[in-house]
Every structure is written in structure tokens, then in C-alpha cells.
């Protein structure tokens, strides 16, 4: 898995940021106050990435051929997230339950709790229950190698969600579904590069809960700065979901020690309350914040003119439906879709958030990402009336 994540990260970083030669302008200059033509070449390249990533998706394209979902009727599918306390993984479980109900399947959630032993226990439960399939959220095989080998030996299909877009395994039994967090992290990075005219002094908040979350920061954020912003200064604060109580003081200490920092880049929205506390404790009013996830409160803050100015996000409900589609394919005897390109991703900024309905219902509907009716599209694809 590490090899796959590394390869993906290098490719995405190279594609998302065109490394052009040239000197940056003054660090304090924002793209909001200057024309694109006045930006440095690096900032112009970053702005092109952000502009393309800001567009909505208005048509559903099937990820593969039609498939019969009848094999899942009355069956149980296990969902094993790395930790339910991680909001996006919790949301994925809720949406999976809703999606798979349409084909008559029940979802059993078993929390791995960031612990290989708990993950192994969940896998054992799935095997004992003769689950129709197992979906893992944010868990690479290396987290519980022996148990996953036992799962595959039992002939149970396995869908790896929220890790990487491709990897090892027999495509008749193993599938990968990911919104591509390396790409999403690179989008928020490109926004900072463009906004700062390629001269940002940025504090990056990196989540080390798993190999996957670490790689997303390494190859989506740090590699993008390294390859696309020679004059950017990057400082990293590492944390995990079990130590969030310490994060505000780490942030305030970094801001006080380095008053030149004017950007904070949170790997996920779950860090934003700590970021706000850290900024307040440091008595700073000149910090621009970016993140990845796209929770309702984050978009509301952007719309209200708060510290958060941009967030890269993906439609978490749509991701659940694509994951459900992988389950349908494997349990029907079809092969997984290889190198799946998940389309429902977008970066939200002050430029486009004003056009959105910022309510919980609108978020759940997926309308922030465009008009494509992926739910109806999948039901038709599965032969469900």
C-alpha cells in the first residue's frame, strides 16, 4: 500500500502543479487584489488548477457496465472504518447503509478504533457471520495483514474505501474506491500558492492516524509545495485524533514563535475548532485558513467571511454510492472497476460558495457538487426499479 500511495502522490503532485521557473512577488500580495496576468508563473499554474477544480459536475457517467444487484438481497455487508470518530468515515457508514438498503442489504458497522487488534476482531466477526462483503474505511491492508489474508481466503469480497484509487489484489475479489485525498490536498495547496502569489508562509496541520492520512499530507500537500512553490515556507505540526486537545496550544505556539506565518492549512475540517482556538490564543487577526472535507459549518464560515477562505471537498454521499457499486459488482461475480476516477469533487471558495444553499439538507442531497443524479443512475445500473 505504501508503494501505491507513494506512486499516486508523486503523479498527482506533478500533474496538479506545473513547476515553472520564475520569481515570486511580495509575500503579502493576494490574488484577490491583482489580476491573474500579474501573478508569478507558479501562482498562475496553481490558479489554473483551482479554477478547473471549482467547476460542478452536472451529468452522471456510469463507472462500468450494468450489473445485477439481486445477489445482495437479504445479505449483510460489514463496514469497518479506521475510527468512527473521524467524521468522514462516520458519514460514509451512514450513507452506505442508505445506498445498500436499495438492494435489500443490511450494513453492520464495526469500529476499528485506530487499533489493529480491534480491526482484526471486526474482520473475524465478518468472517464468522459469512458476510456478503466487507468494506473498510481508511484502512490499508498493512494495518491487519493476517486478518485481511484470512478474509480473502474465506472468499469474501473486500472493498477498500478512502485509502487509494488502486492497489494489489484480484479484481474479482478486491476493489478500491477513493475520492483521491492526495488530489484534494493538492487542490487546497494550490489555492494557497495562488492566493499568496507563490510566496506563502504556511503552517500545515498533518494527521498521522494512519499510513493513508500521513501519505495524503506528504504527497498532496508537502510534495506540491516542494515541486510548485520554491519561495513558500512550510512548517508542519503533526497530530492524531486522540490528541486534538493539545492541538490549539501547538498552533498558538507556532504562530507566536513565527509571526511570519499567515496561512494555516488543515488536512481536515476536524482540526478547524483547534485552529480557531490557536489563532485566538496567539492574538492573530491576519491568518488565512484552508482545509479539506467541506462540512456545512466550514462552507458557512467561508460565506460569512471568516478565517477559512477555501476548502477542497468531495460528495461523501456519492462516494458511498460508488463504494456500494463496487460491492454490487464483486458480489454479482463481476470484476471491480480498475483505477476508478471519482468525479464528484470540488474546491469551494468565496468565488462560488455564494451560489450554494448552505443547509444540512442541501449538503445531504449532494447538490453542492452539481446537478448529476447519481442515485438514480446507480439504481438503473443495478436494475433496481
Image (cartoon, grey):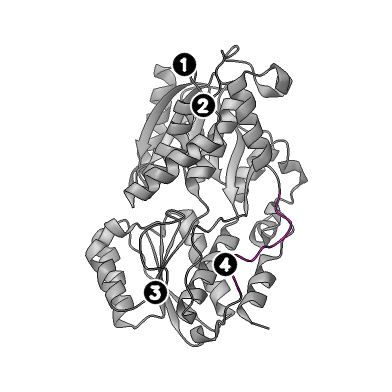
Query: On the image, numbered disc 2 is attached to which residue?
Result: 228
Instruction: Say which mark, if any, is on residue 321.
Output: 4
User: Considering only order in the chain, which callout, 3 or 1, is on the residue closer to the N terminus?
Assistant: 3
Q: Which residues are magenta?
A: 56-65
Task: Give residue 208's position: percent from left, percent from top.
Answer: 35, 43
**Cβ–Cβ below 8 Å for labels 3 and 2?**
no
- Location of residue 244 in the rendering, given as x and y in whole percent from the top left corner: 38, 42
Among numbered discs 3 and 4, the one appearing first in the sequence: 3
Query: In the displayed structure, would residue 146 be above or below residue 249?
Result: below
Whole-percent x, y for residue 358 in the image = 70, 50
- Mark 3: few, some, or many residues within 10 Å (few <14, many ≥20)? many
Q: What is the quadrant of the C terminus in the image? A: bottom right
Q: Residues within 10 Å of mark 2 (few under 14, many from 20)?
A: many
In front: 254, or 331?
Answer: 331
Q: How far apart, in angstroms, are the residues tagged by discs 3 and 4?
A: 17 Å
The first of marks 2 and 1 along the sequence is 2
Q: What residue would you read off at disc 1?
A: 259
Residue corresponding to mark 3: 157
**In screen coordinates, is 369 left or right of 166?**
right
Tag 4 near tag 2, CB within 8 Å: no
Which numbered mark, 2 or 1, is in the foreground of this view?
2
Q: How far apart are the two marked residues, 2 and 1, measured between alpha carbons?
A: 24 Å
Q: Secondary structure at mark 1?
A: loop
For marks 3 and 2, the one nearer the N-term is 3
The residue that appears at 53% across and 33% down in the rendered structure is 189
Q: Tell me if residue 57 is in the magenta stretch.
A: yes
Q: CA distance from mark 4 to mark 2?
A: 34 Å
Q: Position of residue 109 (x, y in %)?
A: 41, 71
Q: Is residue 103 shown to the viewer in this render?
A: yes
> How many C-alpha atoms fall within 10 Å of the one at disc 4: few (<14), some, or many (≥20)?
many
Identify the residue at image location x=57%, y=32%: 190
Q: Earlier in the sequence, mark 4 or mark 2?
A: 2
Amino acid at each position: 500500500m505504501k508503494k501505491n500511495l507513494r506512486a499516486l502522490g508523486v503523479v498527482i503532485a506533478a500533474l496538479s502543479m506545473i513547476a515553472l521557473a520564475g520569481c515570486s512577488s511580495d509575500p503579502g500580495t493576494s490574488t484577490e487584489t491583482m489580476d491573474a496576468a500579474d501573478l508569478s508563473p507558479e501562482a498562475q499554474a496553481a490558479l489554473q488548477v483551482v479554477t478547473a477544480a471549482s467547476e460542478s459536475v452536472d451529468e452522471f457517467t456510469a463507472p462500468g457496465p450494468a450489473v445485477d444487484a439481486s445477489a445482495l438481497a437479504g445479505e449483510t455487508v460489514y463496514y469497518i472504518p479506521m475510527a468512527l470518530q473521524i467524521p468522514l468515515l462516520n458519514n460514509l457508514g451512514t450513507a452506505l447503509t442508505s445506498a445498500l438498503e436499495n438492494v435489500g442489504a443490511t450494513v453492520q458497522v464495526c469500529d476499528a478504533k485506530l487499533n489493529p487488534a480491534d480491526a482484526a476482531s471486526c474482520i473475524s466477526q465478518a468472517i464468522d457471520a459469512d458476510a456478503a462483503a466487507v468494506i473498510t474505511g481508511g484502512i490499508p491492508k498493512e494495518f491487519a495483514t493476517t486478518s485481511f489474508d484470512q478474509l480473502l481466503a474465506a472468499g469474501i469480497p473486500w472493498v477498500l474505501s478512502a485509502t487509494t484509487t488502486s492497489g494489489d489484489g484480484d479484481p474479482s475479489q478486491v476493489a478500491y474506491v477513493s475520492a483521491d485525498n492526495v488530489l484534494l490536498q493538492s487542490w487546497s495547496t494550490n489555492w494557497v500558492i495562488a492566493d499568496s502569489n507563490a510566496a506563502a508562509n504556511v503552517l500545515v496541520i498533518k494527521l498521522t492516524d494512519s499510513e493513508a492520512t500521513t501519505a495524503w499530507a506528504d504527497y498532496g500537500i508537502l510534495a506540491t509545495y516542494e515541486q510548485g512553490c520554491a519561495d513558500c515556507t512550510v512548517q508542519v505540526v503533526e497530530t492524531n485524533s486522540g490528541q486534538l486537545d493539545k492541538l490549539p496550544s501547538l498552533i498558538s505556539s507556532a504562530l507566536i514563535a513565527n509571526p511570519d506565518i499567515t496561512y494555516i492549512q488543515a488536512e481536515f475540517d476536524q482540526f478547524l475548532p483547534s485552529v480557531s482556538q490557536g489563532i485566538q490564543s496567539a492574538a492573530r487577526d491576519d491568518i488565512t485558513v484552508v482545509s479539506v472535507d467541506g462540512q456545512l459549518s466550514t462552507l458557512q464560515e467561508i460565506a460569512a467571511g471568516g478565517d477559512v477562505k477555501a476548502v477542497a471537498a468531495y460528495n461523501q454521499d456519492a462516494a458511498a454510492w460508488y463504494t456500494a457499486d463496487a460491492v454490487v459488482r464483486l458480489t454479482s461475480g463481476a470484476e471491480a472497476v480498475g483505477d476508478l476516477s471519482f468525479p464528484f469533487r470540488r474546491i469551494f471558495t468565496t468565488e462560488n460558495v455564494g451560489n450554494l444553499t448552505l443547509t444540512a439538507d442541501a449538503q445531504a442531497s449532494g447538490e453542492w457538487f452539481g446537478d448529476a443524479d447519481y442515485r438514480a443512475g446507480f439504481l438503473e445500473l443495478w436494475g433496481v426499479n
